Amino acid sequence: MFFYHVRIALKSLRRNPVLSSLLIGGIAVGIGISTAFVTLRHMYVQDPIPGGSDRVFYVRLDSWGGQQSYMSDDPESLPDQVTYADARALLESPIPRRQTPTFVGAAFLHPATAATRPWQAEIRLTFNDLFDIFRMPFAYGGPWTEDADARAERVAVIDHDTNQKLFGGENSVGRTIRLEDAEFRVVGVLAPWRPPLRYFEMNRGATGKPEEVYLPFNLVEPMQIATRGNANNWKPIQPYSFEAMLASERVWLQYWVELAAPGDVDAYGDWIASYVEGQRSLGRFEQTTRYRLSTVPQLIEEFGLMPAGVRAMSIVALLFLLVCSLNLIGILLGKFLARASEVSVRRALGASRAQVFWQHLIECELIGLIGGGAGLLLSLGVLAVIRRHMRNGEALRLDSEMLLFAAVLSLVAGLIAGLYPAWRACRIAPAMQLKVQ
Amino acid sequence: MHIGPVVRAMNHNRTRVTLIILEIAITLAIVTNCVNVILAERAKMATRSGFEDTGIVRLHTRPFVPEFQDEAFIRTTVDADLQAIEGVPGVEAVANTSFQLWEGGGSSTEIRPAGSSSAPVRTQIYYGSQNITQSLGATVSEGRPFAEGEHGSGSGEESASVVIISRALAEALFPGQPAAGRSIEFVTGTGEATGDPYAIVGVMERFFNPFGMPGADPDPFEERGLFYPQRAGSYAQGLRYLIRVSDPGDMAAIITEIERRIVEVNPGRVVEFEPVSEKKARWFATSSLMVTTMTFIIAMLVIISALGLIGITALSVAERTRQIGTRRALGATRADILRHFLIENAIITAAGLALGIVATYALNVFLVANLVDAKMPPMLILFGIALLLLNAIVATLPPAFRAMGISPAVATKSI
Amino acid sequence: MLEMKNIRKIYRTDSIETHALEDLTLSVGTGEFVSVTGPSGSGKTTFLNVAGLLDTFDSGTYHLDGKDVSRLSDREMSKIRNTTIGFIFQSFNLIPDLHVFDNVDVPLRYRGLPAKERRERIERALEQVGLSARRRHLPSQLSGGQQQRVAIARVLAGDPKLIFADEPTGNLDSTMTREIMDLLEGINQAGTTIVMVTHSPECADRAQRRLHVFDGRVVDIERPRVTLTRPAESRIASNLA
């Protein structure tokens, strides 16, 4: 019976191709725009660290001094990063399953052949835990070892693009790369990985790409690598030296922890509180003992990383689809009632009310689905336009979740448009049409 | 004249009437709000940096040879670069500076009038070589630009303790008073003055450089700027310049020539150019995306709702062919029939618009909560109402004319 | 009242010309009750359309109530339909969206009468057909006979000189048919001219004069064979109650 309904519906759509394409086109435009903008919104609200979003925390401490809050107009504000001394101390905590301080630097990467010019690469210094905390995919090799971290070995993980440029995409594990005048052994090559936001360091150009090269954090002291990211201090470093900077109150490091379970957050908070208390007796943390543990979604919210208007745009697009559906109600109503005599003949020939209802509803859903399919194609176009406008456009794609969303949306649109006209059609009496207008 | 029976008759076509009312209401809400957002975003994009954006190009040279580790070498290279760039035909002015427009950030500090104990004022702060104001095309309305030698000379570092500040900063420091000739001091996080006072030699009329994310609330801080004379760079940060050309149309050719000469000065570096207008366009990417999409949505919406209205009115005419014929037989003139449909549609449209005004404000409240600075001006609602009225008239006229043409003889047709 | 000479009406499509009326000549005097019969396709409906100013004709002359119809504009014809003529249709042609009162009101509205007079006329007409109690009912809530009585009330309220009835009993059973015919006779007694198209010989017999239309011409004119007894007003009322 279902396929019979589908066949009848297709026939009915073919009978009036202009009207049908108008109906389908309306739905398609609605679905196309809605899907594109909901996908854009989805990019910012999707689970950033599959399986870990509720256990991965960004650590902030109120190390600011000088009788003012970090942002002078917001007494609630905390420094957005931590000091070197605090990072070293936090590393002592046994509670997190994984943890790392991290920052970004830059250095010239010199290719082995003279044919390619050197270029300035962004380099992230980190402990090997970073790769696991953010579930970074490896194409070859893997993170360096704990030993390499402990001994500050000259090892490196490079990303897919860098491996393409330096080694033509081959498995380069064991080969060396030259940064400025130092050589590093490649232990791992990342698979292509482009998260919508650079989660490690969202307080600076968050829509940028993850860094090209990763080095052990402990190289910071022997190689005197300075940050290329944000740095703030409330006390001048005088006279300035690299050692003085490390010992100073300058905040310049991001600190990430992954707890074994979301419930460990209280225990870890207690540990931090007691550390801060201890520092207070040494004269630091002179203002408050506040600290903050934030998940990635919380930071996205706090830093306002979703462009203003994305949410508004998706709502406007959905409303637009609603108007399209409302328009369809009127048109379908006309279409169905115009063939009332056919319906009453069918009814007279024994079609039940339910069968008439289903036949018409299926026709509407068919319009919805065909419109949805066309809408998906259209949304690819809209997404291409959006992509050109966004720095992180590369990370914008229709995933299976969004495909499902578009399918459900087109069924719902068909239902909104078709429910009432189908109900009206099934109320047509079997014989009435044979006599009265 | 027939309003009573028309309204009572509509009561028996509730679905059709409700549909049209809803459609008009939602369409009004979306159209007015979209236009509102478009206007708001366009206003945002019209924000000028205060400088001649279209004629300015950023030049960033990143050295990879070790001699750039030496600060004295960098200073002499900067001098050579400046000289080389100034010599390129079409270049109006060039400066070596840490100022990068439309970056969404920069450097900042706190200052106050020298010797005072007033609350410190936060301002953006950048170094710039002698021609910094000229390279930005900025008007120095009070005092003067930097003078020769103030940014230091030779390989030495000693630059003059003078600054040029923006009008907005001058107003914050010395409200209602001239600022040129006064002095300021830098303030540390603990509220103490640090270093020697600096003399204000000039005031720029306009300065604007946004901090934070695109679309964030405007901050008076974004209009406060301070330049001190210096030429600098580092191995890590590179050597950065702002170049203003006299004719933006020649930009490409001038860039090629500058690159050639810069590499001649020292080939051990990577050279990157970025026109400020491109940088600004990228900064406003989301805004222009919204403008594009909203414009598209409005156009589609007006077309679709007109088609919907035509369809539904045509349907109501078709359904009532016999009734119209009967009315004609009973003595209605063509004009009566036309009037009947126009009155009916006027009532429905009016109801839709009334509901639409409520919906417009409801949607606006939501949008304002999610999208800064787009309160609905009443004029815009009037515009939306006019647009939809026009839409409704255009959409109902063809079916109404068709109704007018129905022959009274329809009444005697047997079924 | 009605004077037609050599009326011709041709329907044209791309390839076919149909001569619906061919040199139709006829006259109906004031106060007459005339029935028009004829087989399907004989031109009865076309005759009615032309006579009732619902349609135009191609040649011939037609005087209605002393006026030369062929010179009238659409607007003037509307006015005549509205004031001089009353119509009763086979399928009643009540407006489904309007209740009884508003239906009777339709022609009065177009006449632009003041509200008070309209109300009085409607009340009187509804009383005459015995439907005062149903004034707030929709047509769909009434039986066929009641609907036709509403249509007759619509005519009565307009107080026309001439009534065209098109198969007024075509959709009704025999009891209802009798009621409606009694009503029409009563109206005719009160002085209104009636031209009734019908295919029912019984109905046709109740007219004073019978016309037969065949192939677009009036081919047969005969006087009624029997003189009908005239029902009293009270009888109409009791029949309708």
Image: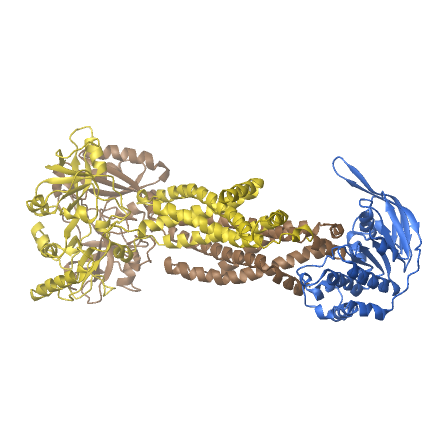
Chain colours: A yellow, B brown, C blue
Q: Quadrant of residue A304?
A: bottom left
Image location of residue A286, percent across then percent down: 13, 66
Image location of residue C229, percent across then percent down: 91, 64
Would you say C135 lies left or right of B267 here? right
Farthest residue, direction front: A350
Query: In the image shown, does A37 or B280 lie closer to the viewer?
Result: A37
Query: In the image shown, does A7 or A336 lie closer to the viewer?
Result: A7
Q: Quadrant of residue C172?
A: bottom right
Visible in this render: residue A208?
A: yes
Looking at the image, residue B188 lies above or below residue A357: below
Image location of residue B287, percent across then percent down: 38, 50
Q: Which residue is drawn at 83% across and 67% down?
A: C236
Would you say B86 lies left or right of B301 here? left
The image shows a total of numbered marks equal to: 0
Q: Quadrant of residue A393?
A: top left
Task: Look at the image and tell me in which quarter the N terminus of chain B lies.
Answer: bottom right
Image location of residue B211, percent across then percent down: 28, 54
Q: Which residue is drawn at 92% across and 55% down?
A: C224
Visible in this render: residue B291?
A: no
Query: In the image shown, does A49 or A225 lie closer to the viewer?
Result: A49
Query: In the image shown, does B225 or A321 lie closer to the viewer?
Result: A321
